[in-house]
């Protein structure tokens, strides 16, 4: 019994020795790399010196020019025709109305640049708009995307630029650089999708329109096409963890041009009123919408004035009228009464 | 700048000329030195800002106050519009009617007008299918008004919804749609493809009853209509209609007429050779012609027909004017003639006409033998001002397969007309006296007209009357390439080829007659001096 125990202790010591030797070999093999410092590693900063600021390449300064060149356009054309359309069809199953209102623009030669101004509820909105605008505009279409959200990381920014032809703009304070670049793009024939609400709806209702679309239109002369998107809030609204497939409706409105004596604020109000009327048209019909537009009684995109549960309650009622509601109604079944 | 129309004197170097043959084409060599071809003017440029022009027309009407000032809350507003018998081929969306009507509805909404009815001014034409209404008016108007029963089609056989407005000194009774008659304002939305349409004809035929229409849609009146497309005073039809218009003006509802004219850019790029002069065809045009022509000859007629009826034409609005019916129509006619008029010197012995796949009475349907007659003698023969292109007693040669084929849903009474009336007589006056009433009062035809998509029972008579003047004027009528027994049933002479037709015609016009070909498409009116 004691002889057997002595043998096993000796064997364990041997194993431990082998282990120690192996560990020492690994340690010594890694030592040169661990000891490598500058210039293999970042230099440490001496105290008391101020480093020069490196130019920012993220956010609004993200370079997306490459995404508007021929190779990227070819990749995007393939992506749009295949994966993007299939994804939109599967996820949002859109019904498109009002494209006939763009017929006059499509007749023009050369094709004019257009500013599409949709309401915004979801990340699905951009692929949906890209998939539903007429082919002629899709070929030269830039999407204004939130610089702080889509262009905060290099990979994310490059993917957004390649797949959606996204262009970074600040949401709160638009710099001259962003607006000048957008003007230049519009002047060279690129159409633009810009969400005047500035971001996705936080609660399912719309937000006040900001003046970006009106400003760009006034400066470039490009018409603004109001667009109303219904149903995407229920598919992948802000705060939802994963998308829930449903049905959507996209209604294009008649192009709006800035009038001579109209300032940007008034033009912006007109764009908002047009999208509001289209929203009413999508949920009711053309005649009802026009009657209410004439009276200024189209239901507001921003929802009722009250707060709290009543606002959410009203949202549920409103969604029943739209495409998302149709999906829910279809799912209803008569109770089995035996 | 579009080139005006012109008359080509055919010589030895003139290439063969394009002829329609129903759902196909042929190229025909015309004899040199005694033939001429009348080419239509090129399409006028369309208005650049069409919606702006429409709005301007509504705000600055002729002889009336601006439309918004005529609209008020609590009023009865009726909007009537032309059916899909025009334009041909159908224009690509948005249709002119949709554009105009949306502008009118915008103004009505702004004025707080609640009571709006939209009525398709069908007359005795067939009721339109849903897809046709949607095409003409757009989905927005259709979806807003049709489900509420506020968009519907005129019924000329509904005694409860017709009202007599008055009677002319000639005893013609004006009986129109009751809703229109009771309205505070009737807005009529028209498309003027040809000079025959528009003016008082829009409302007093489109919203009229059979009784009212029969005053001027008859063999006697049409035989005395000596300038259907030209001078109104030479047209017995228009003289009668203008008398009814006066009754409407004096005793009927107030009418705000909106008329639009279209250019003649009738076929899309894929058929570009159709609109071109033959010697200007490029290699691509020639290849397209060969491809289309050979392809069509291999296709079953049904498929070829569908292919043509599916064409959406790029023609576009050249003018829009609104206000007082007569003032508006005079301006409209100026625009129509500006687009279509071609000066031509003297008449001819033989007039050749290529008959296309479509006439105003078979959109999305079959060009049956009666409509071939109507299109040739009623429409194309009448495309003149002053005097017909062919001399009295001359020969008219048409090219069309003239198959014995009818659309049973759209043209049920045409079938019986062909089998029962034509074997008995082809004389418009005789058939009117002997047969018309029986067809007009047939309960089954009436039922199909009112509830289905059939033309009124009396409509084949009207189609036949339309050609009455041409039939009376010509010494012989020949159809090249038509089904021989069917052509004979029409009272015409069949011929296999154009040369055969010229040989047959020599019995009437001698061995060296002058020949004139009316080059359609597109549309033209020959101003014959």
Image: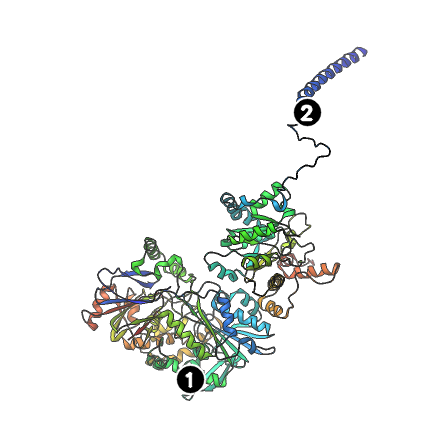
Image-based side of A43 in relation to B67, left or right: right
Which residue corresponds to mark 1?
A: B243
- Identify the residue at the far right of this view: A2
Circle 2 Cα neighbour tier, 10 Å, few/some/many (<14 / 14–19 / ≥20): few
Residue A48: image location, x then y, percent: 73, 34
Q: Helix, strand, or loop for circle 1? A: helix
In this rendering, the answer to whether B17 lies above or below B236 is above
- Identify the residue at the far left of this view: B511
Image-based side of B328 in relation to A114, left or right: left
Residue B180: image location, x then y, percent: 52, 79
Do the numbered discs 2 and 1 sit on residues whose CB atoms are within 8 Å? no
Q: Helix, strand, or loop for circle 2? A: helix
- Identify the residue at the far top of this view: A3
Q: Residue at x 64, y 68 (%)?
A: A296
Q: Report how far apart the C-alphas of labels 2 and 1 lie in the structure.
A: 107 Å
Residue B20: image location, x then y, percent: 32, 63
Seen from the viewer's position, the closer of residues B523 and B373 is B523
Q: Residue at x 66, y 27 (%)?
A: A38
Q: Residue at x 47, y 66 (%)?
A: B95
What quarter of the picture does the N terminus of chain A occupy?
A: top right
Q: Is residue A157 visible?
A: yes
Residue B328 is drawn in which quadrant? Answer: bottom left
Q: State whether discs 2 and 1 lie on one chain.
A: no
Seen from the viewer's position, the closer of residues A136 and B235 is A136
Residue B246: image location, x then y, percent: 45, 84
Which residue corresponds to mark 2?
A: A34
Identify the chain of the residue marked 2, using the numbered disc in the image: A
Q: Is residue B424 visible?
A: no
Circle 1 Cα neighbour tier, 10 Å, few/some/many (<14 / 14–19 / ≥20): some
What quarter of the picture does the C terminus of chain A occupy?
A: bottom right
Identify the chain of the residue marked 1, using the numbered disc in the image: B
């Amino acid at each position: 019994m004691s002889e057997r125990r002595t043998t096993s202790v000796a064997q364990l010591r041997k194993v431990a020795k082998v282990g120690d030797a192996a560990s020492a070999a690994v340690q010594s093999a890694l030592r040169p790399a661990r000891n490598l410092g500058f210039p293999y590693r970042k230099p440490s900063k001496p105290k008391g010196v101020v480093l020069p600021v490196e130019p920012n390449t993220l956010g609004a300064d993200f370079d997306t020019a490459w995404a508007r060149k021929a190779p990227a356009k070819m990749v995007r054309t393939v992506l749009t025709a295949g994966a993007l359309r299939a994804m939109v069809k599967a996820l949002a199953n859109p019904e498109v109305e009002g494209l006939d209102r763009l017929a006059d623009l499509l007749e023009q030669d050369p094709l004019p640049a257009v500013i599409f101004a949709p309401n915004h509820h979801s990340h699905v909105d951009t692929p949906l708009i890209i998939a539903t605008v007429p082919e002629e505009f899709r070929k030269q279409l830039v999407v204004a995307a939130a610089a702080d959200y889509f262009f905060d990381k290099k990979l994310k920014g490059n993917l957004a630029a390649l797949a959606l032809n996204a262009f970074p703009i600040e949401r709160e304070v638009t710099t001259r650089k962003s607006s000048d670049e957008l003007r230049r793009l519009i002047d060279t024939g690129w159409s633009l999708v810009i969400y005047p609400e500035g971001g996705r709806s936080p609660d399912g209702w719309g937000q006040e329109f900001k003046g970006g679309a009106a400003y760009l239109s006034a400066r470039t002369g490009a018409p603004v096409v109001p667009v109303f998107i219904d149903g995407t809030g229920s598919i992948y609204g802000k705060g939802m963890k994963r998308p829930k497939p449903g049905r959507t409706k996209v209604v294009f409105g008649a192009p709006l041009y800035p009038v001579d004596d109209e300032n940007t604020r008034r033009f912006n109000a007109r764009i908002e009123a047009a999208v509001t009327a289209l929203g009413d048209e999508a949920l009711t019909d053309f005649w009802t919408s026009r009657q209410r537009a004439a009276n200024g009684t189209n239901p507001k995109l921003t929802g009722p004035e009250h707060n709290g549960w009543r606002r959410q309650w009203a949202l549920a009622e409103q969604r029943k009228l739209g495409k998302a509601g149709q999906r829910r109604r279809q799912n209803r079944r008569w109770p089995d009464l035996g | 700048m579009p080139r005006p129309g012109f008359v080509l004197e055919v010589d030895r170097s003139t290439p063969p000329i394009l002829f329609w043959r129903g759902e196909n084409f042929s190229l025909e060599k015309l004899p040199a030195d005694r033939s001429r071809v009348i080419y239509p003017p090129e399409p006028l440029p369309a208005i650049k800002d069409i919606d702006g022009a429409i709005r301007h027309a509504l705000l600055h009407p002729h002889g009336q106050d601006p439309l918004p000032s005529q609209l008020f809350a609590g009023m009865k507003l009726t909007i009537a519009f032309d059916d899909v018998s025009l334009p041909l081929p159908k224009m690509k969306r948005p249709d002119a009617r949709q554009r105009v009507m949306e502008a009118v509805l915008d103004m009505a909404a702004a004025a707080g007008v609640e009571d709006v009815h939209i009525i398709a001014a069908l007359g005795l034409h067939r009721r339109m299918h849903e897809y046709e209404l949607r095409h003409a008016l757009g989905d927005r108007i259709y979806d807003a008004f049709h489900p509420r029963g506020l968009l519907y089609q005129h019924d000329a056989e509904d005694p409860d919804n017709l009202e007599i407005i008055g009677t002319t000194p000639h005893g013609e009774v004006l009986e129109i749609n009751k809703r229109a008659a009771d309205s505070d304002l009737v807005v009529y939305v028209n498309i003027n493809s040809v000079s025959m349409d528009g003016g008082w004809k829009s409302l007093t035929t489109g919203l009229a009853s059979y009784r009212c229409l029969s005053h001027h849609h008859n063999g006697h009146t049409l035989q005395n209509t000596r300038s259907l497309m030209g001078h109104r005073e030479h047209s017995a039809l228009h003289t009668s209609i203008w008398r009814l218009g006066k009754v409407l003006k004096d005793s009927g509802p107030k009418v705000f007429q909106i008329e639009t004219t279209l250019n003649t850019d009738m076929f899309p790029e894929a058929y570009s050779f159709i609109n071109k002069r033959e010697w200007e065809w490029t290699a691509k045009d020639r290849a397209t012609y060969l491809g289309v022509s050979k392809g069509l000859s291999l296709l079953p007629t049904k498929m070829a027909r569908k292919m043509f009826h599916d064409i959406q034409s790029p023609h576009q609005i050249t003018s829009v004017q609104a206000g007082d019916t007569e003032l508006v129509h005079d301006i409209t006619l100026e625009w129509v003639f500006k687009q279509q008029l071609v000066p031509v010197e003297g008449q001819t012995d033989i007039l050749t006409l290529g008959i296309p796949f479509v006439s105003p009475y078979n959109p999305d349907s079959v060009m049956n033998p009666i409509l071939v007659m109507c299109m040739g003698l009623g429409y194309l023969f009448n495309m003149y001002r002053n005097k017909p292109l062919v001399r009295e007693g001359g020969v008219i040669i048409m090219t069309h397969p003239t198959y014995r084929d009818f659309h049973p849903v759209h043209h049920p009474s045409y079938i019986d007309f062909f089998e029962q009336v034509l074997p008995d007589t082809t004389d418009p006056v005789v058939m009117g006296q002997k047969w018309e009433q029986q067809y007009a009062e047939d309960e089954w035809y009436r039922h199909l007209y009112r509830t289905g998509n059939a033309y009124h029972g009396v409509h084949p008579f009207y189609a036949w009357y339309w050609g009455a003047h041409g039939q009376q004027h010509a010494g012989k009528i020949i159809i090249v390439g038509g089904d021989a027994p069917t052509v004979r049933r029409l009272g015409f002479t069949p011929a296999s080829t154009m040369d055969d037709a010229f040989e047959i015609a020599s019995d009437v016009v001698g061995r060296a007659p002058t020949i004139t070909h009316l080059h359609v498409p597109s549309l033209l009116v020959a101003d014959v001096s």
